[in-house]
Amino acid sequence: MLPLADQVLELLSLERTPFWTYAISALLLAALALLLRPLLQLLGLFHRYYVNCQRLHCFPQPPRRNWLLGHMGMIEPCEEGMVRVSQLVAAFPNTFLTWMGPFLPFLSLVHPDYLKPVTTASVAVAPKDYLFYGFLKPWLGEGLLLSNGQRWGQHRRMLTPAFHFDILKPYVKIFNQSTNIMHAKWQRLVSLGSPSLDMFEQISLMTLDSLQKCVFSHSSNCQEKPSDYIAAILELSNLVVRRQHRLLHHIDWIYYLTAEGRRFHRACDTVHRFTADVVQQRRLALSCMGREAWLQAKQGKTVDFIDVLLLAKDEDGQELSDEDIMAEADTFMFEGHDTTASGLSWVLYNLAHHPEYQQQCREEIQELVKDKPLEELEWEDLSQMPFTTMCIKESLRLHPPVTIISRRCTEDIKLPDGRIIPKGNICLISIFGTHHNPTVWPEPEKLHWAELCTGRAEGGAGADTAALHRAAG
């Protein structure tokens, strides 16, 4: 049988000379190398997967649904899913492993001692994981929520003036105005015979109304009439959560071919057009007036978030670009409305279930504003509301607006019991799981308001809960 090179020469009708023999042999070797390279890469990938599985073997995991899906669908973003998390935490009170499909592991951390090594690690060791956060990028860009490292630090320093007390204090009047609109709407609906109200929907509109005024100095009257911008934000918030729990939708080109992907794209366009118009108009006004005249015109008036961002400079005198300002504004509209509305809704829900505590909160606040209007209160005055403060904190413990955050370990991280989180793995920092951990919070599903505020349960649930609240700030 002829050698392979000779067979190729014969097939191509080429003369069997040393040159052609060597040339064909070289081409065949190159083709073999090209075929072997992806094969070796695939073998390396499987080897790393095998080694990672062996290193993760020390972490307990609940039974999988099947070999293909892993634990997908076991914890849905609903009440039943949160109940399932509580059950898992009771069974695995420190950490446990789950799988998205057959190849992607997630290590859930549900105890403060186990959260600490990850949350205190540097951003280089435990950066944000973009498997889920990345779904927000087409909407929020490179704002504080999605940025990392040097960019995050630079923007955080430039945004610090936005949280100065002198800037935040005038917002109280805006909050009161938006809340009064909501209350008037409730009274009108009740007078018309409405048997019930969707509290979260109503409060979401109120927080969006407040934020739009504080961020853009724009009043859309969204609590009383439809607003395309507000509707787009609400739709985007819902679509991002839905996408996280659909594995095929994680692939961009598949997602944007679906009806939900097209809706997401249209809603992004609506939000970006609104934000871009505000930023460009404000930038033009600043350029025409000049910085000093602009500042003079703003004296005695409420300074909004866009104003602060336009005037912000870093230590080198560098300003934020229009794209940076848009990203930060969109980020605050998203992060600010949903979390605040969720927290407020659960506080009101829990107070409604405990009318005696509701009355005590009411009396405490009425005593505080007896000699001073609400909008004139200083931060120090809020220390005179210990009962209301504890009720809010305990409600946030039981129903945290953000239930989980994720980090990807770029280096091995050692846990308190000596086990190692192998580098490359995603850690899920379960805020809800930690808050419902029976080894941290005795009777975690119970509201401990009475013990928190009276301190009667020495050494019991109330004392432990109060101590942890204080430690958490």
Image: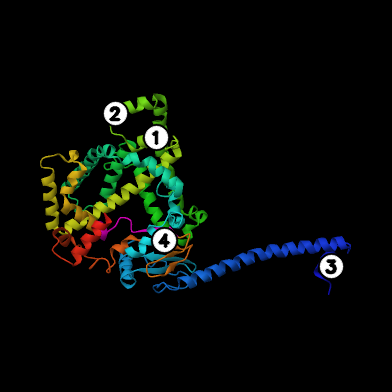
Instruction: Inspect the image, locate mark 2, and give the three-letter code of the amino acid beneath it.
Output: Gln
Among numbered discs 4 and 2, the one appearing first in the sequence: 4
| Mark seen at residue 310 | 1
Residue positioned 77% across, 61% down in the render:
27
Q: What percent of the width, then of the height, locates residue 82? A: 31, 64
Q: Earlier in the sequence, mark 4 or mark 1?
A: 4
Q: Which residue is mark 3?
A: 6
Tell me if I can see residue 141 in this picture. no
Q: What's drawn in magenta, residue-wise? A: 395-408
Compare marks 1 and 2 and give the one earlier in the sequence. Answer: 2
Q: Judge whether 112 appears above or below 363 on screen.
A: below
What amino acid is at disc 1?
Leu
Instruction: Residue 98: tell me if it is visible.
Output: yes
Question: Which tag, 3 or 2, sits closer to the chain's start?
Answer: 3
Numbered badge on residue 299: 2
Q: Which residue matches tag 4?
A: 245
Q: Label 4, label 2: how many angstroms apart (C-alpha)? A: 48 Å
Is residue 331 depicted above or below 303 in this figure?
A: below
| Coordinates of residue 173 in the picture (x, y in percent) | 22, 38
Pointers 1 and 2 in contact (C-beta within 8 Å): no
